[in-house]
Image: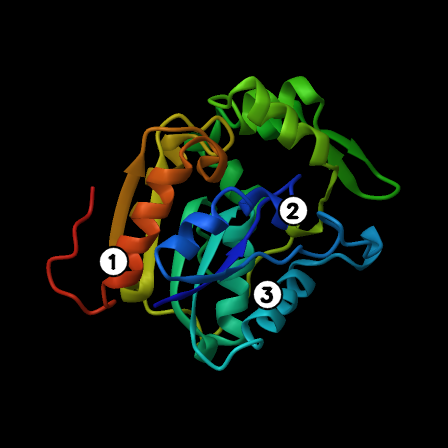
Amino acid sequence: MARFVLVHGAFVGGWCWEPLLPLLDEFGHEASAPDLPGSGADQTPVADVTLDECAERVCGALEASEAPAILVGHGMGGMVITQAAALCPERIARLVYLTAFLPRDGQSLLELTQLPEGADDQVQANLTIADRPSVGALTHKALAHALFNRATRRQLDWALERARPQPLAPFLEPVHLGRTAVDPAKRVYIRCAQDHAIPPALQRRMTDDSPCAEVHELDTDHSPFLTATSRLARLLDQIARRSPTDEGAPGH
């Protein structure tokens, strides 16, 4: 079946996909979930973490197999997969933005959060920044509210134990796509209606500004790999089974 490369967002690591991996395996898919530089278990110095380095890490994961992959980016990971698609487009079958930032050429994550539709972003509202090194942190209370507001106590404890501060360069650096941006026909967006990190209004604004072949919606928070795992697995399986050129692909 399909091959997925799952790209995490801010404050987490590849570990966030662990609940989803066995379900994708049950559907017959192959999936990997690398840590981005400075995240998860990766020990890259903060000064060396850039958006380009994150995208290069993803391209390296894509090179593990000759088969083109469905690249899924979550949250900040949307910036990363967009830049990766400009660096190694031949290795990507489809881009799936899972309640993720969807930038146009020259846009940064910070610029997107400053759009009027981003006013309720609870990450930016609660972020504490340390200049040396340049990282952002959220208290456990703020993480729970912004990222995991539909999680059970057990799910929340599991996530908070693993979360860590986030290098800020990928927030600040714009994507540079040139002529290698992925065809919109290969883009899919999954909105999350209860998201406190990327407000639904901002998700809609981004898909209005950068149309996708398919738009779906899950009634959950910013972390559906944890709080709506089965529904997300089924949706990704449906996306994988459709060709990007299928006519009448449903959007919501």
Do tag 2 and tag 3 residues touch (Cβ < 8 Å)? no
Instruction: Examine the image and state in which quarter residue 181 appears.
Output: bottom left
Q: Nearer the viewer, residue 234 or 52?
A: 234
In the depicted structure, whether residue 195 falls above or below residue 189: above
Element on which disc 2 rests: loop
Q: Mark 3 points at which residue?
A: 58
Q: Name the residue carrying label 2.
A: 13
**Is residue 36 depicted above or below 110 in this figure?**
below
Q: Left or right: 118 with respect to 205?
A: right
Amino acid of disc 1: Ala
List x then y, in percent, for residue 94.
Answer: 37, 65
Whole-percent x, y for residue 147 in the image: 55, 29
Tell me the residue at 61%/30% (across/down): 124
Residue 81, position as x, y percentages in the image: 51, 60
Mark 2: give few (<14), some (14-19) or many (20+) Cα within 10 Å: many
Residue at 66% over, 39% down:
11
Helix, strand, or loop for circle 3? helix
Q: Which of 204 and 147 is in front in this view?
A: 147
Q: Do the residues labelled 1 and 3 touch (CB within 8 Å)?
A: no
- Number of the front mark, 2 or 3: 2
Disc 3 marks a residue whose amino acid type is Val
Quick check: 33 above or below 40?
below
